[in-house]
Image (cartoon, rainbow, N blue to C red):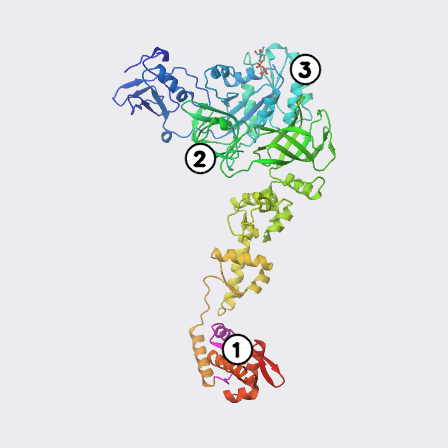
């Protein structure tokens, strides 16, 4: 079954499909076991040992979804034989480039952004339209290329003001760098300035300027424009950005631009290594026949893998990742910082909207209240007042909201303040995400900044403690702040940590969770048993059962404390080998710990096998109080002596440690420093006294002495001891019941 090279699809008889890997497995309807034998899927052998010639039929290959498998149903209708080409995952490494960056273009309309993107990437955004006609809509607002240095970059090219903002925010983590395009013939125009202001607001500090269309101007003019641009950049986040002169038409300067892009990215940390959990802010959701639901977006925070269970927020629908693509390449794992198309199983595309977020289940809760630092742009048309109604853009989401000014009466253009935003619709965002506030009509950007707390309590205005907490958050992440509160390496109660960090309970939990994951902190005990849920504020969730951390300590602090404890106990055991352990109180003062902290420290250490806590004593697990053979002999001698006169024995000739060992084991009872009874004799005397009092109401020293035939010294010692034990009480000359 040979197909002549160049056979067109429409000529019927055969479908020819090119796979995207070195080794592919092909199946056809009539030859299910077909195996490709060549490396670029040029030829294959069918189950019937027929060789198949695969032809590159110039299907659009640059999409995010592997268009080829997607169009199979169409092919099946038009050709006699259907072959599905599937990359054999096991046989080739996942095509995940090590570093991925997202670059956003900016600049005045018609200044040549799209043309430049095409010149850089070879991807023509115009073919979008054609693809849409063919109902294979895949968001191709994104072009990509590999820079000379090997980095993979996605370029987000978007005209139109609102889309510009949304795409600048895309992927929540935002873009890594911006390419500001300025036409050399027109120089700086109003939108150039506006976009620059937004880049500034979004804190996009990395980027470069492309002075394009230089084929239209002479050298002298170009120099003038260069100066003007440099002037305009002064005082903005682009003040030191490189300016590269190019012509998309002639190709002049394009190589220079690519190289400069590469060096610019040298200073931008790659997000590809982020170790968090995947979060994809969805900007498209659609279905492809034969494929199902596909969503696209920029991945942030952590990697996403085929087979992952995911949750679509804010609705909380569950789905599974069936396939992943980055820059037209199928991958098993998508890295943060890259543009991703996700094929989902278990959810209808209509149920997902732009602005929804795909996350690893349980990772994030949607929110309707946000605390943030707001910077009002200098060009804002008016002052922001309490309760103003504005439009919030965060990630790919947008929602109307109201502004509570927390620390000021008004915010004038150019000013900054703390705000609480109350949202009409829930969004998914995390601390540190960039956001923009716009006035709905006439549409214009008012200000923006970064989300400081994505799950705050509702605040009253002008509360110093609220401002203190927000100021604290501005200094560091919740994890930083909890870590700082634990920096003295001593155990602290949870309430102390919350207070010192300046955070509220749920943020402090968020910070703690991060430290627990990296073992930088330990929870020695929980006040309430259960599993620790980061970010869950028991007060807010109303879940009284939610476990509350008890005592915490830094990872280093714990290692030091444990070492110290073990050393102290070892020393104690060496000094007092016959004692069962060190009294807790003594250990507490040696370690200089608070009582409650000691309980938690001991509980944790004994659960982890570092020591044994037995009532009022603490010992090392391996410690055993055992007398030596010589000591055993001395003990035997002493006991024999005690037995000779059990009720009036001579003081045993034992050192205090050996005597203590016998007392501890209940062999003897010491009633005064030199009156020691065998325990059996002691018990007998005590019960006699109790019986006497029960039957006759009292007992005297004389009667006791007569009964046991011992001297007044012993009788008195025992009765006084019983007074101390509150078994008897002295009343005149007699003992009565206590
Ligand atoms: P955008 O709105 O910024 O994306 O601008 P476009 O890329 O659509 O370009 C606007 C117009 O400028 C188009 O007619 C382009 O052909 C033209 N153009 C873009 N780049 C160049 C260039 O380097 N040289 C010349 N002569 N024309 C250009």
Of label 3 and label 1, which has the lower sequence position?
Answer: 3
What's the CA distance linking mark 2 and mark 3?
55 Å
**Left or right side of 395 for 81:** left
For residue 622, the mark is none
**Where residue 704 appears, x then y in whole percent?**
53, 86
- Depth-wise, is mark 2 or mark 1 nearer the camera? 2
**Where residue 267 appears, x then y in whole percent?**
57, 30
For residue 308, the mark is 2
Residue for badge 3:
224
**Where residue 586 appears, x then y in whole percent?**
57, 65
Residue at disc 2, CB closer than 8 Å to ligand 1: no
Residue for badge 1:
670
User: How many numbered callouts?
Assistant: 3
* The quadrant where residue 166 appears: top right
* Residues drawn in magenta: 646-669
Task: State the residue in front, 595 or 386.
Answer: 386
Residue 656 drawn in magenta: yes
- Depth-wise, is mark 3 or mark 1 nearer the camera? 1
Whether residues under marks 2 and 3 lie with C-beta atoms below 8 angstroms apart, the answer is no
Q: Secondary structure at mark 2?
A: loop
| Residue 238 visible in the picture | no
Task: Note whether 526 is above or below 382 in the view shown.
Answer: below
- Quick one: label 2, few (<14), some, or many (20+) residues within 10 Å? some
Quadrant field for ligand 1: top right
**Left or right side of 139 for 109:** right
Residue at disc 1, CB closer than 8 Å to ligand 1: no
Q: Secondary structure at mark 3?
A: helix
């Amino acid at each position: 079954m040979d197909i002549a090279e160049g056979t067109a699809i429409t000529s019927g008889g055969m479908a020819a499909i090119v796979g995207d890997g070195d080794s592919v497995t092909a199946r056809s309807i009539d030859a299910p076991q077909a195996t490709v034998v060549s490396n670029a899927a040029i030829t294959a052998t069918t189950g019937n040992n027929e060789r198949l010639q695969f032809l590159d039929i110039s299907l659009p290959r640059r999409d995010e979804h592997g268009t080829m498998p997607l169009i199979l149903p169409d092919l099946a209708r038009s050709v006699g034989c259907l072959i599905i080409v599937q990359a054999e995952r096991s046989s080739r490494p996942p095509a995940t480039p090590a570093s991925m960056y997202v670059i956003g273009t900016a600049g005045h309309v018609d200044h040549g952004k799209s043309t430049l993107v095409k010149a850089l990437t070879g991807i023509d955004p115009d073919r979008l339209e054609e693809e849409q006609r063919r109902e294979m809509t895949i968001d191709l607002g994104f072009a990509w290329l590999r820079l000379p240095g090997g980095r993979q970059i996605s370029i987000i090219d978007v005209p139109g003001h609102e889309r510009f903002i949304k795409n600048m925010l895309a992927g929540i983590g935002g873009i890594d760098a911006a390419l500001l395009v300025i036409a050399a013939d027109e120089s700086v125009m109003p939108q150039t300035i506006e976009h620059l202001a937004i880049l500034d607001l979004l804190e996009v500090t990395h980027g470069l300027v492309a002075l394009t269309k230089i084929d239209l101007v002479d050298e002298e003019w170009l120099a003038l424009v260069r100066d003007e641009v440099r002037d305009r950049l002064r005082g903005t986040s682009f003040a030191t950005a490189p300016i590269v002169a190019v012509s998309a038409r002639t190709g002049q300067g394009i190589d220079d631009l690519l190289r400069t892009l590469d060096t610019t990215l040298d200073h931008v940390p790659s997000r590809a290594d982020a170790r968090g959990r995947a979060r994809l802010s969805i900007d498209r959701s659609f279905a492809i026949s034969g494929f199902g639901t596909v969503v696209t977006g920029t991945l942030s925070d952590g990697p996403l893998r085929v087979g992952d269970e995911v949750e679509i927020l804010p609705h909380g629908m569950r789905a599974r990742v069936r396939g992943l693509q980055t820059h037209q390449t199928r991958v098993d794992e998508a890295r943060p910082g890259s543009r991703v198309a996700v094929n989902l199983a278990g959810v209808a595309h209509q149920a997902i909207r732009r602005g929804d977020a795909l996350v690893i289940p349980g990772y994030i809760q949607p929110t309707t209240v946000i605390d943030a630092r707001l910077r009002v742009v200098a060009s804002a048309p008016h002052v922001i007042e309490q309760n103003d109604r504005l439009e919030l853009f965060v990630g790919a989401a947008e929602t109307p909201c109201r502004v509570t000014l927390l620390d000021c009466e008004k915010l004038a253009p150019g000013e900054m303040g703390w705000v609480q935003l109350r949202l009409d619709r829930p969004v998914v965002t995390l601390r540190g995400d960039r956001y923009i506030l716009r006035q709905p009509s006439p549409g214009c950007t008012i200000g923006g900044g970064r989300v400081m707390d994505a799950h705050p309590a509702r605040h009253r205005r002008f509360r110093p403690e609220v401002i203190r907490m927000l100021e604290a958050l501005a200094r560091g992440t919740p994890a930083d702040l909890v870590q700082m509160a634990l920096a003295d390496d001593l155990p602290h109660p949870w309430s102390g940590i919350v207070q010192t960090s300046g955070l509220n309970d749920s943020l402090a939990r968020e910070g703690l969770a991060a430290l627990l994951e990296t073992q930088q902190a330990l929870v020695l005990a929980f006040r309430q048993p259960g599993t620790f849920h980061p970010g869950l504020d028991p007060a807010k969730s109303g879940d009284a059962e939610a476990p509350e951390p008890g005592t915490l300590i830094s990872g280093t602090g714990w290692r030091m404390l444990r070492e110290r404890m073990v050393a102290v106990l070892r020393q104690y055991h060496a000094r007092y080998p016959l004692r069962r352990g060190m009294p807790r109180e003594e250990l507490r003062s040696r370690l200089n710990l608070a009582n409650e902290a000691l309980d938690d420290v001991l509980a944790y250490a004994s659960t982890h096998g570092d020591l044994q806590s037995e009532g009022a004593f603490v010992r090392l697990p391996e410690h055993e109080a055992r007398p030596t053979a010589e000591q055993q002999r001395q003990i035997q001698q002493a006991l024999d002596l005690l037995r000779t006169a059990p009720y009036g024995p001579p003081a045993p000739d034992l050192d205090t440690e050996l005597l203590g060992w016998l007392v501890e084991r209940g062999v003897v009872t010491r009633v005064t420093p030199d009156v020691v009874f065998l325990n059996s004799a002691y018990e007998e005397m005590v019960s006699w006294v109790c019986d006497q009092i029960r039957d006759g109401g009292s007992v005297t020293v004389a009667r006791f002495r007569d009964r046991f035939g011992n001297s007044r010294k012993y009788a008195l010692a025992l009765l006084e001891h019983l007074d101390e034990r509150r078994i008897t009480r002295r009343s005149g000359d007699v003992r009565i019941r206590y």
